[in-house]
Amino acid sequence: MLDLTRLQAPIVLAPMAGGFNTPALAAAVADGGGVGSFGFAYSTPEAIDQSLTATKGMTSGPLNANFFVFSDVNEPSADQYQQAEAAISALAPRDLFDVEPPRSPFFPDLAAQIEPVWRHRPAVLTFHFGIPHDSIIQQAHDLDICVGVTATCLSEALAIEAAGADFIVAQGWEAGGHRGCFDPSRPDEALEVRVLTAQLAKAVSLPVVAAGGLMNAADVAQVIAKGACAAQLGTAFLACPEAGTSQSHRRFLLAESGRETAFTWAFSGRPARGIRNRFMQAMEGRPLLPFPLQNTLTGGLRRWAAASGNNEYQSVWAGTGVSALQQVSARKLMERLVKAA
Ligand SMILES: Cc1cc2nc3c(=O)[nH]c(=O)nc-3n(C[C@H](O)[C@H](O)[C@H](O)COP(=O)(O)O)c2cc1C
C-alpha cells in the first residue's frame, strides 16, 4: 500500500469535480513525485473508467479517485420547490436557461461509480462529506488501495480513524470548493489549515494531508512543520495549461483574483468557497433546496453561464490564496513546490 509519508514530493493534487482534473494534470503531478487526483463526484462509471485508463497510459505514478459520500435526502414539498425555483428564475432572463426539477435518484450510486476503481486499482481512494460504508474500506484494503477521508474538525478525524481509514485530509477554512464537513447543519469550528493540521497531527495516529489556501513552497513547508505528511493543493493548479479549466474561467480567475472569496450554499445546497460573484450576492438569504437537489436546480443556469463565458452566474470555486494564482505548467509548479519542501 502507498505510504503517504514517503512520497517523493509531498504534494497531492486536490480532487476537483467539474472537469478540472484531466489525465494530463494528474499525470504531471504523479510524475513529479506527488499524487494525481480525480474528483469523480457526479461522474458516470464509463467516464471514470475512461479517465483512469487514459491517465494510466500517461504515468505509472500514484493516482487518487475521489468521491462524495451523499446522504439520503427527502423529496422537497411543492411549495419548497416553487420558492427555490423562483429564486433561480429571477436571476437572468428565463428564456436563456432551464431550471431543472430534481428527480429521484437525486445522486449517483456510489457502488456503481466505484466499480471501475476496483478494476483500475489506483493507489489512493478518498471521500468527501463523510465516511463510506465499511465494505468499501475493506474492499480497498483487500486491493492494497490506501483510503483517505476529509475532516474539518477533530471529531470528524477521530471518526475517520475509528472507521479504519489510512489517512486524513485536514481541510482548513481557507480551502476552495465544498467544505467537507460531515453535517453542514452543525456549527462549524471554521479552523484554519495550520491550526487544524497541528491539532489532528497531535490527536490522531494517521498521516495528515493538509489542504486549504496553500499556494507555494513556503505554505507547504509550514503545514509540514505543523505535522502534515503532505499538502493537497487545488486552486494553485487551476490555471495550469494541463487543467480542464475553460478559457473564460481561467481568465476570470486570473483577472478577478483580487476579489474576495466567500462561502455560499446557493449553488449546491452545501457550503463551498469561491470567488464572490453576482450569483452569490443575489442569492443571499434566498430559499434553497437541500444538497444536492439545489445543484441540479442551478445546473441549467450554470451551463448557460459557462457556455456564454459569463462567470458571474457559475460557481468559480477558489481558495483564499487565489490572488497568488499563476499561469504555470503543472510540471514547473511541482518543481517549484518540491524544491523548497
Ligand atoms: C474547483 C474545486 C473543486 C473541488 N472539488 C472537490 C471534490 O470533488 N472533492 C474533494 O474532496 N474536494 C474538492 N475540492 C476541495 C479540495 O479537495 C481542497 O480541499 C481544496 O482545493 C484546498 O484548497 P485550495 O483550493 O485553496 O488549494 C475542490 C476544490 C476546488 C477549488
Image (cartoon, grey):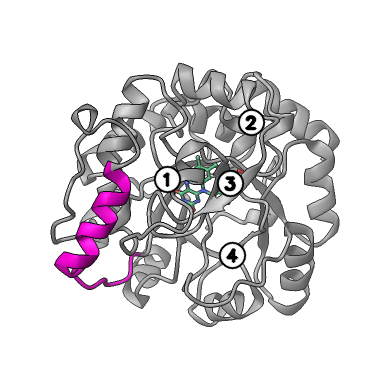
Callout 1 amino acid: Gly
Location of residue 43 in the rendering, given as x and y in whole percent from the top left corner: 28, 44
Which residue is identified by label 1? 39
Disc 4 residue type (three-letter): Phe
Cα–Cα gap, marks 4 and 2: 21 Å
Q: Which residue is mark 2?
A: 32
Residue type pointed to by label 3: Gly
Q: Nearer the viewer, mark 3 or mark 2?
A: 3
Residue contact at pointers 3 and 1, CB within 8 angstroms:
no
Q: Quadrant of residue 270?
A: bottom left
Task: Tell which of 331 and 181 is nearer to you.
Answer: 181
Which residue is drawn at the image coordinates 67% and 64% (left, top)? 207
Judge depth for marks 3 and 1 and give the one in front.
3
Q: Is mark 3 within 8 Å of ligand 1?
A: yes
Would the CB of label 1 be found within 8 Å of ligand 1?
yes
Q: Which mark is residue 176?
A: 3
Q: Nearer the viewer, residue 91 or 208?
A: 91
Which image quadrant for residue 71?
Answer: bottom left
Per the model, the C-alpha gap separating discs 4 and 3 is 20 Å
> Is residue 74 one of those drawn in magenta?
yes
CA gap, disc 3 to disc 1?
Answer: 14 Å
- Foreground of the two, 92 or 68: 92
Which range of residues does the magenta coloring cover? 70-89
Mark closer to the chain start, 1 or 2: 2
Q: Of helix, strand and loop, which one carries label 4? A: strand
Q: How far from the left and from the top, in percent, is residue 121?
A: 37, 50
Q: CA distance from mark 3 to mark 2?
A: 23 Å
Return the residue at label 4: 167
